[in-house]
Image (cartoon, grey):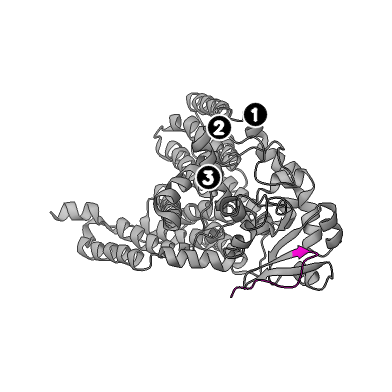
Amino acid sequence: MRKGLIKVFSFPVFLGAVLAGCVFHFANRGVADPDIWWHLRNAEYLLKTHHFIRLDMYSYTVSGVPWINHEWLSELPYYFAWKAWGLRGIFVLMAVLIEIVMLGVYYLGCLVSGNCKAAFLGCWVAMFLATVSFGPRTLLFGWIYLIVLLAVLWRYKLHGKDSLFLLPPLFLLWVNSHGSWLIGLVVLFLFVVTGLFDGIGGTQQLPRWSPAQLKRLLTVTAFSVMALFINPYGYKLVFYPFDFALRQNLNVASVEEWASVDFHSFRGKALLGAIFLVLLITVLRRQSWRLESFALFLFAVYSSVTYMRFLFLAGIIFAPLLAMRLDLVPPYEREKDKPVINAAFVMAAVLFAVLTFPSEKDLSRDVQRLYPTKAVGYLQSLPLADNRHVLNDYLWGGYLILNCRNVPTFIDSRVDIFEYNGIVRDYLDFANLKGSLEVLDRYSIRYALLSTSSPAGYLLRHDPDWHAVYSDDVATIFERGSAPVISQAR
């Protein structure tokens, strides 16, 4: 009986439960992400028509322009969860995905260090960095695929366990789920190449790849690359990440998560602390690097410093690397395990999640605080001939796509298609009060749906040609040439 309890409620399981409870606390932020709304609409269209979206059908500014829905596969689970349980369904799926990622990082730490305590400590670095992308994001699927990739490669390199056959189907799923598959290809490349050399500059190396191992890796890599082209958009989907890097300059320059890390912020300091901690332990313990670990470390540092979005990537990679270096932490001793105490903590973690789980009302209130839920009713009451030219806040475009379907958007968070056609530049000019009235004239805008506190809203309030016809704490609707305010909600 005791052996069975130890197996089910062992100390490593206890640490995993504590980690899961803390992750749930940080992930309990609601589901009000700007992208989730149009993801749900995309999935609905696919399931109802059995056709993939190939042209824009949500806006009037780029209507009919070719568009690739490069995250179509990862949209479907969110849609099924939403249809089954509403906003709570989205939250459940989001929480499960985040827990899978963080527990997967814990597994990686245990795998490379053989020490569950060191892996647990390393995961705290990952948790603080990963909060940058906690939300109902399709990117979470990409991070799960990355963890699977790292587990397969490290099992092969450190323990000789060959699960490389999983990689081609993994990349097939990945390319249809999210553009982060390119990160996975870089990681695979680093593992293959570093295995060709001995240690460099103080690094050490496990035995080089044998000819048989190298042939196996190259074959699997070739099949993985070929698997990328098994998608509904062909080569265009494979080239999308490169297109993003080369053509979406305004997206990278203006969207917060693509900004460089602010080292005055909490996350910036956490990143610096993680880098310093890894290097400090390395120096004090006079440890050498394995070549593939050093390459991964440099890749994670460069990516996360350059783009805040990749702090999550840094957390996934730093945690197991830190666990490797914490060899001073005493290892787990099975014979000293206390399964009853472990079970009590596991149950406490489950109870904590149940008691703090948000209600549908809580989630709806969070949405109402950030989105124009009340203003949508007024927009939907407008005659179709009038509401074809509404300029909307960028962050609200996705919400309108799902919840105000008779009103085409001016712009939404599918930034790529709008940047290619000059809409992003015009919107930024409008929002930054750089020729705002000229932009309104250029697109023959009749109505503007703006944040009540926006600078552009202040401008329109003081322009004689524009008048507020609806206002609440979140949104104000302006009409060109209308009478003063006729509708207010508080």
Magenta residues: mostly which secondary structure?
Answer: loop
Which element is circle 1 on?
Answer: helix
Q: In front of the other: label 3 or label 1?
A: 1
Which residue is found at the position 40% from the left and 59% from the top?
120
State how far apart marks 1 and 2 are (Cα): 18 Å
Q: Which residues are magenta?
A: 479-490
Image quadrant in which the C terminus is located: bottom right
* Viewer can see residue 295: yes
Of label 3 and label 2, which has the lower sequence position? 2
Of label 1 and label 2, which has the lower sequence position? 2
Viewer-nearest residue: 70 or 391: 391
Residue 175 is situated, as x and y percent measured from the top left of the image, at 56, 36
* Label number found at residue 254: none
Of label 3 and label 1, which has the lower sequence position? 3
* Label number found at residue 235: 1
Which element is circle 3 on?
Answer: helix
Residue 459 is situated, as x and y percent measured from the top left of the image, at 80, 70
State how far apart marks 3 and 1 are (Cα): 19 Å
Going by the picture, which residue comes out furthest to the left? Answer: 1
Which residue is found at the position 66% from the left and 66% from the top?
263
Queried whether the magenta region covers residue 482, the answer comes back as: yes
Report the amino acid beneath label 1. Answer: Tyr
Quadrant in the rendering for residue 451: bottom right
Q: To which residue does mark 2 refer?
A: 51
Q: To which residue does mark 3 refer?
A: 142
State how far apart marks 3 and 2 are (Cα): 24 Å
Q: Is 205 left or right of 89, judged from the image as shown?
A: right
Which element is circle 2 on?
Answer: loop
Queried whether the magenta region covers residue 271, the answer comes back as: no
Which residue is found at the position 53% from the left and 25% from the top?
223
Q: Are marks 3 and 1 in contact (CB under 8 Å)?
A: no
**451 up-or-down from 249: above or below:** below
